[in-house]
Every structure is written in structure tokens, then in C-alpha cells.
Image (cartoon, rainbow, N blue to C red):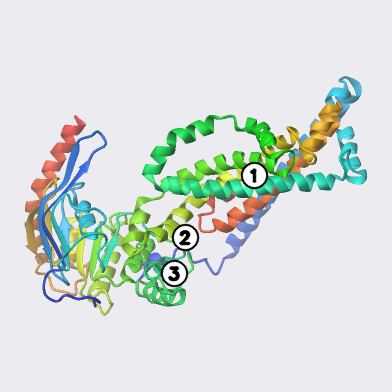
Amino acid sequence: MLPDTREPAQAGSVDDGQAAAVAQARAAHRRRLTGINAVRVLLVVAVLGSWELAATHWIDPFYYSKPSAIWSRLVDWFTSGTSQGSIWTQIAYTLEEALIGFALGSVGGVVLGIVLGRSRFLSDVCAPFIKAANAIPRIILASLFVIWFGLGMSSKVATAFVLVFFAVFFNAFQGAREVDRNLVNNARILGASRTQVLTSIVVPSATSWILASLHSAFGFAIIGAIVGEYSGADKGLGLLINHAQGTFDSAGIYAGMIIITVIALLAEWLLTLLERRLLRWRPPASSVEAQI
Amino acid sequence: MPTQETPDGPAIELRGATKRFRSSSGGVHTAVRDLDLTVDSGEFVAVVGPTGCGKSTTLSLVSGLEPPSGGEVLVHGTPVGGIPEGVGYMFQTDAVLPWRSVLDNVATGPRYRGAGKREARAKAREWVERVGLGGFESYYPHQLSGGMRKRVALAQTLVNEPSILLMDEPFSALDVQTRGLMQDELLRLWSGSGTARGAAVVFVTHDLEEAVVLGDRVVVMTAGPATVKASFDVPLERPRDAEEIRLTPEFLDIYREVWESLREEVQITRERGADRAA
């Protein structure tokens, strides 16, 4: 009766030829991965090695530093602390600023983006202001925030917030606008109220847009926190880097950069996990194979 | 079945209904003009017309998604304002929610209407079985074939037990064999022991064969702006087998008769298209 229902059923019995082919494909896949990783390691070794070599023999390590110096600076920071105190305190401080700014900015961006995205009138009214606000070089606001909120944590949170907010806002706005009219009409016919349309259709539709923006938004949150610390702070990684700059300690700047990069990569990984969880319903083709 | 059956009086009445749209260039486009159409409770009306003539607009007037620019639209005797109670609408393109499993998709309607999660799911499970998707409850739409997604949409609509069922070329995107199967399925659910029994159906299609196979009556629309050109009763017996009935001489007789009427309108639409292309 239902010839079109057999499609997703897995073939239960696999004959030998099939099994051999599967094993072969797996082995080829594994070989390919090993090859890629080997070349990657080689590349890193080549770059760091030539840098080390050049800094030892030809260029001035005072300006350009060298991998071994950066490494020993990192070891030094983690074992005996920095000029500003324990490295963990600095990391925790910066991370806290970034996280608070990120949370506030994304919630604000999502809410305002969806509200404006669903209301033609409001979005038409606000369009020029949003455009203008987006054109402001927002990073400069960090200086203003230091004057407004002082050297403490709130000025950095404010900078991170501003950077995150706009990144998330535009995506949520676009996502809420591009909701399939068909889905909305269908929901209305099925008996959905306005709020139900919003929560069960608009928000889930916009989720993939919003999640995409969160990846770059966390990077922005860290940038906001660091730049905020840079323009005046009493703790944090930005201050550490600023201090390194003040003492012509190029190894210190690199070391700070590396710590920040690691933090950003960890956050990226966590966000990818979240995204996989929330977007389970999506066909896997685009996310697995195309990912680099 | 219907919960609020009004035995007397038609299910749907359109009196001189007109719908105009403002086009983006500032002009006005008339999609439907002076349309009169009456559909009785329990009647299966198939509407055919040339592509793009305004058939879908007619359905959106009945469903309350669009208000008419002129004339009257009555559902169960009351003028339509907002979405009337008891209306189900199956769209041409997929309107199932891609982020919900088959079961939760079907449970959507009852949930919107205030049923608890458990109750809605129990109801949904029953309908998932009834449209032949038993065992696929936890699949997501992207894991299903086009025909199966249509079954989900059908269950999603029927679970609300509509007394009026509007269908806008629901099977046009399917391949011929699957389409025949779905037509059979629809007839089975509509006339069988299911709760959709007695629902008034307006089935819009550009496929005359489909219209004759399904309908008690075939209404021919003019080339846009749409208005009713002619109405033909289909004297074929029910229950019908959608695949077999096409081969009977009675089918061919009525097909020929309706096609005589429809042909001119298709011709007009084609000439317009040619003019625009030139």
C-alpha cells in the first residue's frame, strides 16, 4: 500500500561484497585524514623552525621575538605569575567581562532583532538610525565607556556588549524577516495565536541565523573586553598586553595573543556543540562534509 | 463528523467576491472578479483553471488569510473575518515544520488549540497511523520523501477535524505515481470511516484529470481575473479508484466535456504569455 515509505529503512543484511567495499572506503578515509594531519604538523614545524632560525641568526629578536622566547614567557606566566599577579586571575577577569558582554549583547540583539524583523512599521522607522549606529566605529566607544563607567569591569562589559549586540542583531533581524510565509500561514490556519506564531515559527526559523552570528559574536566579545582593558584597566589580559607593549616585551605580546586564541577556540568548540544540539533537525550534508 | 454542523445552508458561499492587489509598481492587479461559488457541506468541489488565474487567491479568501476587496465571503453562513473555525488548508508547497518530528508536526494543531502535550500526541499518533506513516513518528521532514511529507501535511490538517478542507494543488509537486497514490489516500480519508467524513472540500488544481477523478463537481475558472465560467457535475460512482477510473469511458466523456470549456481559457492565458514574452 505504501511503496514510498521504504526509503529511510536501513538495509538489514549486507552481503560480503558490500562489507568489503565499506571497509575499503573507511580505510581510504582514514589514510586521507592521517595525510592531512601530517602535512599540518609539518607546516607548523616549518614555520616555527624557520622563525626560530631567522631570529637566532639574522633578524633582531628584540623586535620580532622568537618561538622559544614566547614559550618560556608562557611557562613563566603560568608558573611564577605575571607582572600584574597570577595569570589565572587575568584570564578569569577578561573571560568574565567577555561572557557577561556576550550574554547581554546576544539576548538584546536577538530580542530587538526579532521584534523589528516582525514589525514592518518599526523596522521602517528605525532603519536610518540602525544604519547610522552600525556605521559608527564602535571600538572608539571603549574610550567613552572608560570615562562613563570607570576602570572597573563595567566599562569592558559595555564595550563587549556593543560589539556583540550589532553582530547578533542584524542576523536575528534578517532571520525573522526571512521566515517562510507559508509556515506562518499554515500555523495561523492550524489555530496559532500571534504569540504562538512568534514562539513556534519565527524563533525556530531564525535560530540558524542567530547561531551563525554567535560564532563571530564571541570573538567580538573578547575583542571588546581586551580593547576595553587596553584603554584603561586594573586587571586582565588586555592590560597584560598593554604592559608588555610599554616595556618593549614582544614575547609578552605574542604570549598574550596565544592565550586569547586558545580561549576563542575553546568557545568556538562549545558553540559548535550547542549548534549541533539545537539544529539536529537539519539535513547533515551541509554541516559535516563542508566543514573544514 | 463536524463539531459545529449546520445541516442547512451551504458550507461556503462567495457572492460577487473580488480581490485586488496593489502591485509593487503602484498599479492594481485584480486576481478575482465577481466570483460566485457555493459549496455544500460534504461536497467535494474541484476547481480547475489556467495556471496563475487566481485560484489560490479564492482559497485565501475563504480561509480568511486575505480579506476580500469587494463582495461577500460566508463560511457556515457567517461573513469571514479572521480565520473561520473548522477550516483546514493544505498548501501547494511544503508547510511542515522542518525542526519538528513527524509526530510533533501532526500534534501542532491540537497544541495551538490548547490541548495538553500528552493528549495532542495521542491524537497525532492516531492520525500518523491513519495516513500510513506508522513507525516514522520520530523522523524529521528532511528524512522523508516528498510523498511522505504530503502525508504529514495531510495528517496535520485533518487532525483538527476540519468541516471545510481547502487544498491548493497539494499534489502538484509529486511524481505521477505518488500523486495517484495520494489521490486515493485522500478519497479514502474523506469518504471512509475517518473523521474527515462529510467535510466540504475545495480542491484547486490545474490538472483536469485530477479534478475529474476527485470531484463531485468540477468548476472551471476563467483566465485571470478569475471568475466561475462553468460548473460540471461528475456522475462517477463512489468509492472511486483513482488509478482505474481514468480508463473508463464515463471518465473520458466528462473529461472531454470539461476540457471543451477549459481549453479556451488556457488558450487565452497562453496568448497573454506569448504577448508578454514578445
Looking at the image, do the residues carrying marks 2 and 1 touch, with CB atoms under 8 Å apart? no
Q: Residues within 10 Å of mark 3 (few under 14, many from 20)?
A: many
Q: To which chain does the residue with label 3 belong?
A: B
Nearer the camera: disc 1 or disc 3 = 1
Q: Earlier in the sequence, mark 2 or mark 3?
A: 3
Task: Give the structural element (helix, strand or loop) at label 1.
Answer: helix
Q: Give the vertical position of B190 relative to B173 (above or below).
A: below
Q: What label does residue B159 carry, if any?
A: none
Q: Residues within 10 Å of mark 1 (few under 14, many from 20)?
A: many
Name the amino acid type tagged 1.
Answer: Phe
Left or right: where A154 falls relative to A50: left
Disc 1/disc 3 C-alpha distance (Å): 36 Å
In this figure, which residue is indicated by the disc labeled 3?
A: B103
What quarter of the picture does the C terminus of chain A occupy?
top right
In this figure, which residue is indicated by the disc labeled 1?
A: A218
Left or right: where B57 falls relative to A280: left
Asked if marks 2 and 3 fall on the same chain, the answer is: yes
Looking at the image, do the residues carrying marks 1 and 3 touch, with CB atoms under 8 Å apart? no
Q: Position of residue B84 (x, y in %)?
A: 24, 64
From the viewer's side, name the closer residue of A171 and A230. Answer: A230
Task: Identify the residue at image location x=90%, y=43%.
Answer: A81
Q: To which chain does the residue with label 2 belong?
A: B
Q: Residues within 10 Å of mark 2 (few under 14, many from 20)?
A: some
Q: To which chain does the residue with label 1 belong?
A: A
From the viewer's side, name the closer residue of A26 and B87. Answer: B87
Q: Give the vertical position of B163 relative to B58 (above or below).
A: below
Name which quarter of the figure residue A237 lies in.
Answer: top right
Q: Give the vertical position of B181 relative to B69 (above or below).
A: below
Left or right: where A56 falls relative to B278: right
